[in-house]
Image: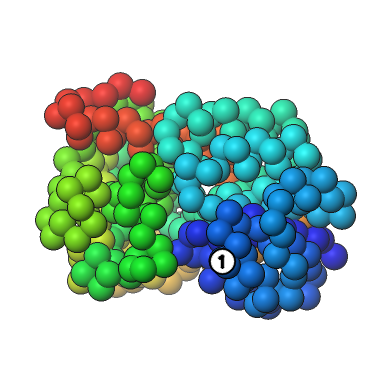
Amino acid sequence: MANVALVGCAHIHTPGFVKRLQARDDIRTIAVWDHESARAQTYGSQLGAPSLDNVEAIWNDAAIDGAIICSETDQHELLVMSAAAAGKHLFVEKPLGIGARDAYRMADAVEQAGVLFQTGYFQRGIPAHQFLKEQVAQGVFGQITRARFVNCHAGALRDIFTPEWLWMTDPARAGVGAFGDLGTHALDLMLWILGDVEKVTATLRVVLGKYGPDCDETGEALFGFANGVIGSLAAAWLDVAEPVTAEISGAEGHAYVRNRTEVFIKSANLPGADGQSPWTDLPPAWPHAFDLFLDALNRKDLSGEPIPLVSAREAAYRSAVMEAMYRAAADGAWVSL
């Protein structure tokens, strides 16, 4: 059995992670800390763990194997650096950093410490996305020309952040607004499937102004990938629906994902892929990204295969690309990576 500490309870996904911890019989939460003591007490009570006033007690406790960091993004660097120095395995909720500098410093520290790392990019494990990655790797699309990924919801329309999660609407604390908050998932998929980018540009908008003039509520980005693919990404808190969440087009094939569950693919390189009905031969879903981390703490694997964690270096690169997109939007220009 692995012992963990919940370090920071600010992220909107914290309640979901707490439920996942409660459902595990191979993980024990033995400490909870947050700079707001009331928050720590709330989640400590739910997890049957003491809430601590001093986070140093967690770093100094040799019985604690891993730290789950769900703090405000601007607190990540201090907590991650301390946890890595203490040899704690790390789950850090996305995004890793405010930008490139702090994210890469954290990645360096994690790699030097040799600890496990994971972040919340759960969409990799969705069968439709695994399938797209496999088909790209196998050349089913031929020369890929363009790709589009979308991750939107109605968060601002439903005001899901008030009052408890309002820090996520403050770019000074979160590093991003709606585009970065949701777009980081779509960005991760694009980079995971298609590789690195050379340049980016973006347009961000405040439409309702619900969270002030500095918090973007919707945005679109355009990428020039190193392999020649043109990519586009949409992310927003203003959408009442998002039926088509991914699309890849190439000289020898085309595919799109509907509602993240159904894949329609057309290619002469894949027998039966006529694009008329959903493709049913999809890989099994992975456990949630958070559960993959908890599995790794207990050295479990997926059918004998290594557990597919996101590396700290990958997470840092995504923070760097996202920062470049925000800079491009501010400057009205293309930004090179």
| Residue closest to the eye, 250 or 76 | 76
Q: Residue 231's image quarter?
A: top left
Q: Residue at x 23, y 57 (%)?
A: 211
Q: Which residue is under mark 1?
A: 39
Q: Residue at x 62, y 43 (%)?
A: 79
Can you say whether 132 is above or below 231 in the image?
A: below
Q: Residue 333's image quarter?
A: top left
| Residue closest to the eye, 335 or 270 | 335
| Residue closest to the eye, 126 or 296 | 296
Residue 220 locus on image (x, y percent):
20, 46
Can you say whether 321 is above or below 14 in the image?
A: above
Amino acid marked by disc 1? Arg
Q: Residue at x 26, y 24 (%)?
A: 335
Residue 320 locus on image (x, y percent):
41, 32
Q: Residue 298's image quarter?
A: bottom right
Query: What element does badge 1 sit on?
Result: helix
Instruction: Quarter of the image for the C terminus: give it.
Output: top left
State whether residue 301 appears in this view.
Answer: no
State left or right for residue 271 relative to residue 122: left
State left or right for residue 315 relative to residue 78: left
State whether residue 165 appears in this view.
Answer: yes
